[in-house]
Image: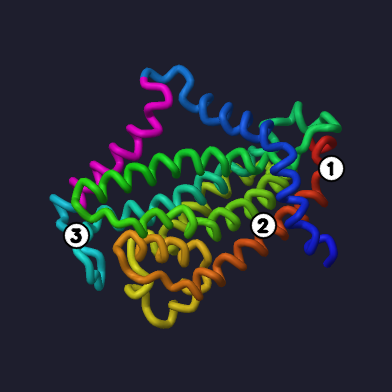
Amino acid sequence: MSTIVGAPWRIVSDIWQHRFLLGHLIKRDVLLRYRGAMFGVLWMFLSPLFMLAIFAFVFGQIFQARWPQQTGDLPFWLLLYSGLITFNIFAETVSRAPGAVRNYASFVKKIIFPVQILPLVPLGAALVHGTFNFLILLAALAFIGAFHWQILMFPLLLLPAVLLALGLSWFVAAWGVFIKDMTQIMPMFVQVLMFVSPVFYPVEAVPPLLHPLYRFNPLGVVIEANRNLTSGLTVDWITWTWALLAGLMCALLGHVFFQHAREEFADAL
């Protein structure tokens, strides 16, 4: 119990103490992804812009879709995009977590290296991409004349999803050292989660019997909160607070588990 209670301070201390190393690893991770590409890091802008244009054409012009039980005038494709921003941050972090430690085997075998920060690298890279997605969202809202200042709270509302992704990343990164199949399992898990979370539909469209499962899904709560914020609707702060506590608990347990398992990493690698 004392291990869990002291975990928040150790997490904050580790991040602060190794912030420059962590920043360098995240920068390296992002740049390596675009190394050799003709447009380089411009793809961080071009990729979400292209995706948003496809959404606008397919759902806005071809299907002329409307959000189920929608009360505002915001286009379907923009509501869908706002939900995907949240989900993609989580998905990128968790799907890449199995290799977070294994890909740095030479670092792990060095006794003085802070192995515990490695699972934060995919999260940091996902947040970088999420930032560019958010900027595209702001530009789209301004373009259609629907920009409002409340939308700037979008990053704050992401906090439960970020903590949830961090906690799962610590769990999965540790498992990935011992179970190589995790690199195949997690992408499938993320695909399933995308369809059972309210990314393409609101919770109200789900049969009432399943509402509790969706209401107690921290990721779904954040997706719904940010979608409501984008639409200019009221955010359910009570449910969001519950999601924040759930995300915090997942992060604490994940950190404790990772610290317990790290002693065996060098031997397994």
| Whether residue 177 can be seen here | no
Vertical placement of residue 74 versus 263, above or below: below
Query: Residue at the bottom extreme?
Result: 209
Quarter of the image where one finds residue 67: bottom left
Q: Main secondary structure of the magenta part?
A: helix
Color theme of the render = rainbow
Residue at which label 2 appears: 251
Q: Residue at x 38, y 27 (%)?
A: 42
Q: Residue at x 13, y 50 (%)?
A: 61
Q: Residue at x 51, y 43 (%)?
A: 127
Residue type at the position of mark 1: Glu
Query: Residue at the front extreme?
Result: 149
Vertical placement of residue 242 versus 176, above or below: below
Check residue 43 for magenta coloring. yes
For numbered disc 2, what is the local secondary structure?
A: helix
Q: Position of residue 112 (x, y in %)?
A: 84, 32
Residue at which label 1 appears: 264
Q: Position of residue 48 (x, y in %)?
A: 34, 39
For numbered disc 3, what is the local secondary structure?
A: loop
Q: In the visual, does 124 lie left or right of 58?
A: right
Distance of label 3 from label 2 (alpha carbons): 37 Å
Residue at which label 3 appears: 65
- The crowd level at tag 2 (other Cα within 10 Å; few <14, some 14-19, many 20+) is many
Q: Quadrant of the C terminus?
A: top right
